[in-house]
Image: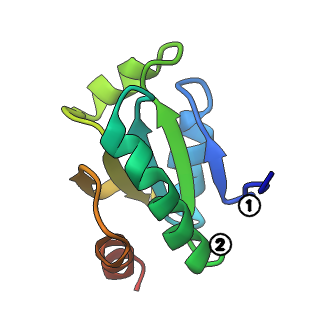
């Protein structure tokens, strides 16, 4: 099976502060708020992975499954209303977001506009 690179990882309520908020001071972190019952979430997952891999570690991807443990509290905190919602964090703060499945060129341009 294809091993995920270190810059693509699962995150939950308990390590979100360290792995997303604090880590975003070093490099941007894209957080994928998703659920396994959500077909657009399943559709966008490989697209996000390919786009993030094309940035070769300049951007990290944290995947947060909202139905696991207390993760819905994070979705509520960030006012996530639909899934998937993708939020870009930089310097400890939300920079921008988009919802629903999008093509790779949209995601690449979205990231480019925030890391340059």
| 1, above or below 52, in the image | above
In which quadrant is the C terminus drawn? bottom left
- How far across and how far down the image is residue 48, in percent? 47, 61
| Residue at 23% over, 49% down | 99
Residue to which mark 1 is pinned: 5
Q: Secondary structure at mark 2?
A: loop
Please indicate whether residue 93 sits to the left or right of residue 62 in the image: left
Please indicate whether residue 4 sits to the left or right of residue 83 in the image: right
Which is more toward the observer, 42 or 65? 42
Q: Residues within 10 Å of mark 1 (few under 14, many from 20)?
A: some
| 55, above or below 9, in the image | below
Which is more toward the observer, 20 or 3? 3
Q: Which mark is residue 53?
A: none
Q: Secondary structure at mark 1?
A: loop
Kindly tell me whether residue 93 is visible in this rendering: no
Residue to which mark 2 is pinned: 57
Q: Residue furthest top?
A: 69
- Quadrant of res 96: bottom left
- Asked whether disc 1 touches disc 2, contact meaning CB atoms under 8 Å apart, the reply is yes
| Residue at 64% over, 55% down | 8
- How far across and how far down the image is residue 41, in percent? 38, 42
Q: Residue furthest bottom?
A: 116
Please indicate whether residue 113 sits to the left or right of residue 24 in the image: left
Q: Residues within 10 Å of mark 2 (few under 14, many from 20)?
A: some
> Closer to the camera: disc 1 or disc 2?
1
- How far across and how far down the image is residue 88, in percent? 38, 58
Please indicate whether residue 6 sits to the left or right of residue 13 in the image: right
């Amino acid at each position: 099976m294809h091993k995920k690179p270190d810059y693509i990882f699962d995150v939950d309520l308990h390590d979100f502060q360290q792995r997303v908020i604090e880590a975003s001071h070093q490099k941007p972190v894209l957080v994928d708020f998703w659920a396994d019952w959500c077909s657009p979430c399943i559709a966008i997952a490989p697209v996000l992975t390919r786009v993030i891999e094309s940035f070769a570690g300049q951007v990290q991807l944290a995947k947060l499954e909202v139905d696991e443990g207390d993760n819905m509290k994070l979705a509520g905190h960030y006012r996530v209303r639909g899934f998937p919602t993708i939020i870009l964090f930089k310097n400890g703060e939300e920079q921008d977001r988009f919802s629903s499945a999008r093509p790779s060129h949209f995601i690449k341009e979205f990231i480019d506009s925030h890391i340059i």
